[in-house]
Image: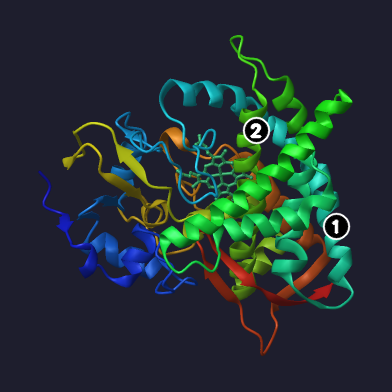
Amino acid sequence: MRNDIVEIKFEDMSRELRSMIVYESNGAMDVETPQTLFDEILRTSPVVRWEMGVGFFKMEDIVAVARHRNIVSCDPNTGEAMGMGSAEPLIPLHIDGDIHKHYRKLLDPLFTPPKMKLLEPTIRATADQFIDGFIGAGQAEMYSAFCTPLPSTVFMQIFGLPLEDLDFLIEKKNRILKNEGTSFEEREAIGRVEGLEMRAHLRKRLQERLSTGLRHDDLLDTFIHFELDGHQLNEDEIINIMHLFTIAGLDTVTSSLSCILAWFAKHPEERRRMIDHPELLPAAVEELMRYESPVPSGGHRTVTDDCEINGVPLRKGEIVYLCWASANVDPAAFESPHTVDLTREQNRHIAFASGLHRCLGSHLARIEIVAAIDQLHRRVSDYWVTPGAEVDYEFAGVRAANHLPLSFTAR
Ligand code: HEM
């Protein structure tokens, strides 16, 4: 038995800890620099046991728990999914065991690094179009002018959904992830209603596509014609996958790009280095994904059978919380974890999760973020936070610099 497990009653937890472990939207977290909080948790309570379950913060523990077969992402008793506007489990995020493997076998080949590399010219051209829209003004609010429309447009193209749907889908996604509900249950109920409306729309698009019978070079076409071991996806499975992809595709890259761009805007020396040496950018983006960890944690997991992982006993039915962001600043895993070293060589971060449910879209996300920033750096000789203005951050499961006023000098 380990001696670093801290037992704590839910009512005695700090508001910061609650905002993470049970996703309480109480505004307690310092969203701009949460690394200080993670550092404190790692030192004082790296494993937290409360009435409902166990929270893990250290890299070594998280990596072991995230790949353990007794830890599943969908509660087998309720069969319910949480936080994504869907009562039914979403494929593949809330699916476990062999069926999950089967779906990943279908989906993984669509997002390989070579396939994603082919998208780079389109991503760069799309980035240029958005830059054209604000470059003349010398300043822009980059969250809405660049970080939101660029990844969303790219994703709609890859997906095969018409661009005219974008505003509607972004609104639905936002209402699912962050709505006015004051309790978890209320937010969840509103999110599910929004999720149903989003699904109805996605179903309409799928049926339109099916009715034409025409082939396309996009994900929707692939889903329709998938076949693996005699299994073809039915309409409900396709809608289910579209539901998750819409949320993942329209939120995470936007948030990550905004955090990374905000970091560069506030660090002139490192920014200049990247503008002058674009070949350093891919490693720098990895380092900033590690440090910023825009998706700080995974959805709750459930323990299916009593077990012990790294000396921590887990009981059947308990909730498990995993914090990727604290693991990414764990001194046992990284040398000087609070130093942002843009040329860090050993960088096995888990900003895209770890284990069985590691991110399917990580290669797409990486290419989008690097191409977006590089394309911006080709068009401006420098940029900075607009004097007198401030960068604002929000945390709604995902961290974002959701107000990013930047000024720049065009080349
Ligand atoms: C920088 C952008 C992104 C970040 C930081 C990110 C992060 C993550 C994380 C942390 C998870 C694990 C969630 C959990 O365990 O509860 C995950 C899973 C997933 N992500 Fe991403 N993601 C990003 C972009 C994308 C994109 C663009 C797609 C679109 C295809 C995508 C699709 C998925 C899917 C399908 C899963 C579930 C995988 C499974 O359960 O097997 N992600 N992502």
Left or right, residue 228 beside residue 372: left
Residue shown at the point (41%, 53%) measured from the top left: 328
Query: Hey, what amino acid is under mark 1?
Result: Asp
Q: Which mark is residue 111?
A: 2
- Circle 1 Cα neighbour tier, 10 Å, few/some/many (<14 / 14–19 / ≥20): some
Query: Hey, what amino acid is under mark 2?
Result: Phe
Q: Which residue is mark 1?
A: 128
Please say whether residue 167 is visible from this viewpoint. Answer: yes
Q: Is mark 2 within 8 Å of ligand 1?
A: yes
In the rendered image, the residue lying farthest to the top is 230
The quadrant of the rendered image in which ligand 1 is seen is: top right
In the rendered image, the residue lying farthest to the bottom is 388
Q: Is residue 407 above or below residue 298?
A: below
- Circle 2 Cα neighbour tier, 10 Å, few/some/many (<14 / 14–19 / ≥20): some
| Earlier sequence position, callout 2 versus callout 1 | 2
Residue shown at the point (87%, 58%) measured from the top left: 129
